[in-house]
Amino acid sequence: MLNRRETLRAALALAGTAGIGARCTAQTTAVSGYRPADVLRGPAGMAVSNSAAASSAGRDILAAGGNAVDAAVAVAFALAVTWPEAGNIGGGGFMMIAPPEQDPVCVDYRETAPQAVTATTLAEQTDRRHPRMVGVPGTVRGLALAQQSHGRLSWQAVLQPAIALAAGGCVVEAPLADSLNAVLAAVSKSTAPWHRPLEQTFGHPQRRRWRAGDRLVQPVLAATLQRIAEEGPDEFYSGQTARSLADYFEQHQGLITAEDLEGYQAVLRQPIRTNFAGHQVWAAPPPSSGGVALRLALQMIEHVGMPDPGDAAWTPMTVHIVAEAMRRTFRERAAYLGDPDFTPLPAWLGRRAHAAKLAESISRSRATDSRTLAGDIPLETGPVESPQTTHFSVIDAEGMAVSNTYTLEASWGSWLLDPATGFVLNNEMGDFNPVPGVTDLKGQIGTAPNQLAPGKRMLSSQTPTIVRRDGKTVLITGSPGGRTIINTVLCVLVQHLLFARPLPEAIAAPRFHHGWLPDQLRIETGGQSRLGELRGRLESLGHRVVETRGQGAAHSIAIEPASGIRVGVADGRRGGRVAATLIG
């Protein structure tokens, strides 16, 4: 058998012509970084999410005869109860579905702008937790579209775990306790009256800090979920919940109306596909920038070529090359990507010739000044996407795979909660380019494709991803993290597919991010990461290095091609758990 270094060299030289199962078997060296919160191997169905209760809900639906989509819908609704800082029915996202023997599809349930907006509606809006910042929620319609088109069980059945968790209470895990305490401390400093209901709903009944082992009971949310289960998804958009929300926004200076809610539709879209290291990588299409950006970065990395990192997770040169690909990718993202119903995707943006042209400008000896890449984007001499999103992965015994990322935008969204409905509302309007024409060196983007318009979906970085080899799914991944999401997934793919790391080590490996503007390379130094040791070498190449403790939470599943064994990995950066059925 080849040793680890020989196997890795072959993988790098041949761009992945060896099978992933064989390469994982050859990998034995631990990679410094974050220890996974949970790793589980099993032969059948599996769910990985931020919450033990939500993962268990998915497992139980699988055990009851549901498929991966049924389980994913159950996990998503359960996370709305057990991880309310990002799990939601008041936000939106993207679900990648890969049925066996069929090409993957993407359910786009991104939020939309209300009909009352103009391009400059938010140009002077400084309070990102204001009712005007709420986009029309898409989660319920999106989960319904996924379940109706690909599910097996009834709508009522897949909502039952979430209803039970809300009504009977969910056990508070340590990450949830920290999240609850943090948001309550922050909200207590707000003078806005519309933030008080969140305190009243999520404050501890004994008026103390939350601790692991406490029980969080949400009776109002349970009643809302019960109505949605009994009356169907239309209840959220035209029933009692919709009427209550419309009244709430009218009373609190919001923009969303009953007509906005009733008119919302989720959409089935064709994912973005690219070939990388002998695999087919499928990811979410616009209005997510994830798939297009991931494709472009992977194409540039293959064109430039990666040196052998040896036993190190990363070397200065591998970080440098990937960071330069990231830098160029995010410039193209700013220039061309938005809601495809308003801004068609240029066909040439996905061609390898375009990636090759960009890659030719990458120097191995010097970091590029981001300003020189602006081209026809005028630069001013702002706000960015929040890192508080959540991702989960599911697979069933038959091999149907689901990768889902959804969000409220900021942690706990807008801090707004209609007391009659019991769920937190998003502040996704902040993902539009707020000031037309103003792109600055701090990271605010003002390009036309993502400017505000009625009914438009705001650009996202969510990157739920499914990887196949020879027609079979071998990896389900994704992450939260705002604009860093794309680069978190990129790091995982490079580690797992190109550097031959088994999935637990690929998840544990340190990560980094370059988003074009601001012109800085953010490297992860928390956990046991050794990226900080590379700082001097990276700065000598011209990178402006900023250290961060953690990046993303890539709850993922790998499938070993030869055996079919599934390896579920919960990313230790934000906790999480894997739950699996014992048999199909």
Image: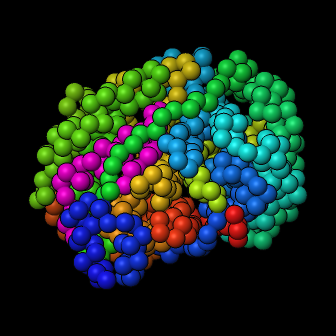
Using the image as rendered, state which of residue 242 and residue 344 is in the foreground: 344
Instruction: Determine if the magenta segment contains residue 522.
Output: no
Res 255 quadrant in image: top right
Q: Is residue 459 above or below residue 45?
A: above
Can residue 93 be seen in the rendering of this structure?
A: yes
Q: Is residue 127 above or below residue 556?
A: above
Res 116 quadrant in image: top right
The C terminus lies in which quarter of the figure?
Answer: bottom right
Instruction: Determine if the magenta segment contains residue 291.
Output: yes
The N terminus lies in which quarter of the figure?
Answer: bottom left
Which colour scheme appears in the figure?
Answer: rainbow
Can residue 419 be seen in the rendering of this structure?
A: no
Residue at 55 percent of width and 18 percent of height:
454
* Residue 54 image offset from top left, x and y in percent: 71, 58
Residue at 54 percent of width and 62 percent of height:
557
* Residue 33 image offset from top left, x and y in percent: 42, 73
* Residue 138 image offset from top left, x and y in percent: 64, 34
* Residue 220 image offset from top left, x and y in percent: 86, 44
Residue at 47 percent of width and 50 percent of height:
465
Is 490 positioned to the left or the right of 452 in the image? left
Q: What is the total number of numbered labels drawn onto the structure image? A: 0
Range of the magenta residues?
279-308
Res 181 quadrant in image: bottom right
Residue at 66 percent of width and 41 percent of height:
150
Is 429 positioned to the left or the right of 191 in the image? left
